[in-house]
Amino acid sequence: MNHCFHCEEPIPEGADWSFEWNGSLRQFCCAGCHAIAKTLVENGLDEYYRRRTAPAVKAAPDENAIELAKAYQDPNIRKARVITDHEHIELHLYVEGIRCSACVWLIEKVCLELPAVIDCQANAMTHRVLVKLTTDEAVPMVLERLQTIGYRPHVIRADEDSTVREDRALLKRLGVAGLVAMQTMMFAVGLYVGDGQDMAIEHGRFLRWTSALLACVVVFYAAVPFFRGAWQNLQHRRLGMDVPVALAIGSAWLVSMVNT
């Protein structure tokens, strides 16, 4: 069965959406994916398909996103949701559909092409996008532009609890990994010193297995985002940035457990 060039989902029987790109006929599962791909190619943004390491999200009508863009044409709503300083307007977005570094490249490039955009910074891990604007009147334009290329933006406030929850979770994992690493090194020093001072066998075994247990905490808690991202990449038969990281962590843990 053929798969959609844009989202890589199976193409239903009877579907007839296609166009030629890079010397080959590209087929699509629906009119939405076809329209998004054609928009990217016609606007010189087809580098996205060369850079991506994961398929795009399947295009689907999103009435909420459409209504969101319309709502932000109201200046009162804009002023209540964007952050203003002395030099520019900050628009904080949570964007559904970010899959890899190519998505980051595409979002930043598309936003920076808009006249009112000063800067754009996207994060593939948190799905957060920060857009700096010269005027809040450009907010609907940014939202509509992101919808056009297949993403689903949601306006958030930088100081909202929901927007920092994921960042806090990642920092928590990082903190646990750091504390466990320090404690494991302390046990390792004890083993090194003990080897030269006739440490009792049961004491050495205790330190080794305690270190192994702490290593399991790091692998199965702190490193979970890497394994989750690697699994998603492998499901789509792609080698994303998470795959080698997860492979290195898993291999090192396995070898350590065998040697313990």
Image (tube, grey):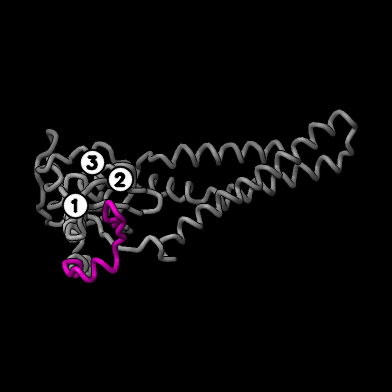
Which numbered disc flags the more N-terminal residue, 3 or 2? 3
Name which residue lies at 20% across and 67% down: 72
Give whichever of 84, 152 is nearer the camera.
84
Q: Which residues are magenta?
A: 71-91
Q: Residue furthest top?
A: 196
10 Å neighbourhood of mark 1: few (<14), some, or many (≥20)?
Answer: many
Give whichever of 100, 254 is nearer the camera.
100
Name which residue lies at 20% across and 46% down: 110
Q: Tell me the quadrant of the picture where the C terminus can be found.
A: top right
Under mark 2, the amino acid is Val
The residue carrying mark 1 is: 149
Under mark 1, the amino acid is Ile
Give residue 215's position: percent from left, percent from top: 65, 45
Q: Taking 81 as reference, is 107 above or below it?
A: above
Q: Taking 154 as reference, is 50 above or below it?
A: above
Under mark 3, the amino acid is Tyr
Regarding mark 1 in the picture, which secondary structure is present there? loop
Name which residue lies at 32% across and 47% down: 121
The residue carrying mark 3 is: 48
* Residue 154 relative to residue 216: left or right: left
Give residue 151's position: percent from left, percent from top: 24, 56
* Residue 20 relative to residue 107: left or right: left
Give residue 116's position: percent from left, percent from top: 18, 50
Cα–Cα gap, marks 1 and 2: 12 Å
Give whichever of 256, 96 is nearer the camera.
96
Name which residue lies at 68% across and 42% down: 182
Which numbered disc flags the more N-terminal residue, 3 or 1? 3
Give residue 135's position: percent from left, percent from top: 20, 56
Q: Which mark is residue 104?
A: 2
